[in-house]
Image (tube, rainbow, N blue to C red):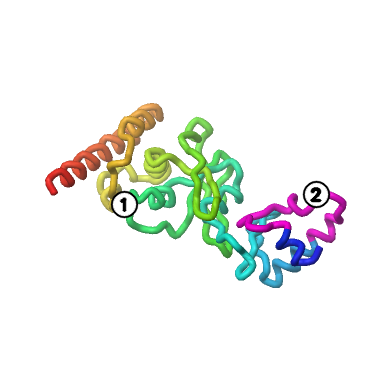
Amino acid sequence: MRFEGLLATVGDAPLFETALLLAGDVDPVHIRRQLSRWTASGRLYQLRRGVYALAPPYQKVKPHPFAVANALVRASYVSLQAALAHYGLIPDVAPVTTSITTGRPRHWETPLGSFEFRHVKTSWFHSYERLSLAGGQQAFVALPEKALLDLIYLEPGADDPAYLQELRLQALEPLNLSRLAELAGGSGSPRLERAARHITKLASAEAAEYREL
């Protein structure tokens, strides 16, 4: 396969897998050798074994970090600060895209960013949805309420009001406070329930401020 053939096959896809190129009557050894050469020459980014992205100037759609995270670990969803920033609940852009998985913790440094995968037990792996992203991309992302609780669940001391204050939570009106309380209550964790009550107070205080404007 020539590189022009790869571009025609990949098209607008921001990410692709080796399996896409192995369909039909092809030599798998030759295809993998070519992928290695194109990666070494800077035409491709290898994100993990079998997952690639076209490098500029060849890429037509810039891969979204959330889509990359989902491709790195299939059974995962984006959460914590990355999801909170996406929803506008915190003002800062997350330097690392953190995801939740029931598999082992992992960390990837790629040309497309830094990606962290945090382990949770199977019973806590829920409350996420597939979101539409820029360029027609999609990714599984925690619901806003679950992203907050995932952070508190995984970070020591995150249930402390001072920690939540440091997050600079904002624009809390879209939060489903009933869902937040339900998720926290269903966790069986007193610290998550305490944090949910505090977040509810913050949301109420924010709403009162808006009413006074």
Q: Is residue 80 above or below residue 183?
A: below
Between the C-alphas of marks 1 and 2, the distance is: 48 Å
- Quickly name the residue at label 1: 167
Q: Residue furthest bottom?
A: 41
Between 135 and 93, the one lying in front of the other is: 135
What residue is drawn where x is 61% and y is 57%?
Answer: 14
Where is residue 59? Give x, y as percent.
Answer: 62, 64
Where is residue 189? Give x, y as percent.
Answer: 37, 31
Q: Which residues are magenta?
A: 9-32
What residue is drawn where x is 13% and y is 49%?
Answer: 213
Between 202 and 88, the one lying in front of the other is: 88
User: Which of the 4 quarters of the picture holds residue 203?
Assistant: top left
Q: Is residue 98 left or right of residue 61?
A: left
Residue type at mark 1?
Answer: Leu
Q: Nearer the viewer, mark 1 or mark 2?
A: 2
Where is residue 198? Give x, y as percent.
Answer: 25, 39
Residue type at mark 2?
Answer: Ala
Q: Is residue 157 left or right of residue 122?
A: left
Q: Residues within 10 Å of mark 1 (few under 14, many from 20)?
A: some
Please tell me the numbered disc located at residue 23: 2
Q: Residues within 10 Å of mark 2 (few under 14, many from 20)?
A: few
Where is residue 55? Give x, y as percent.
Answer: 63, 66
Q: Is residue 17 magenta?
A: yes
Which numbered disc, 1 or 2, marks the residue that appears first in the sequence? 2
What residue is drawn where x is 45% and y is 46%?
Answer: 79
Local SS, label 2: loop
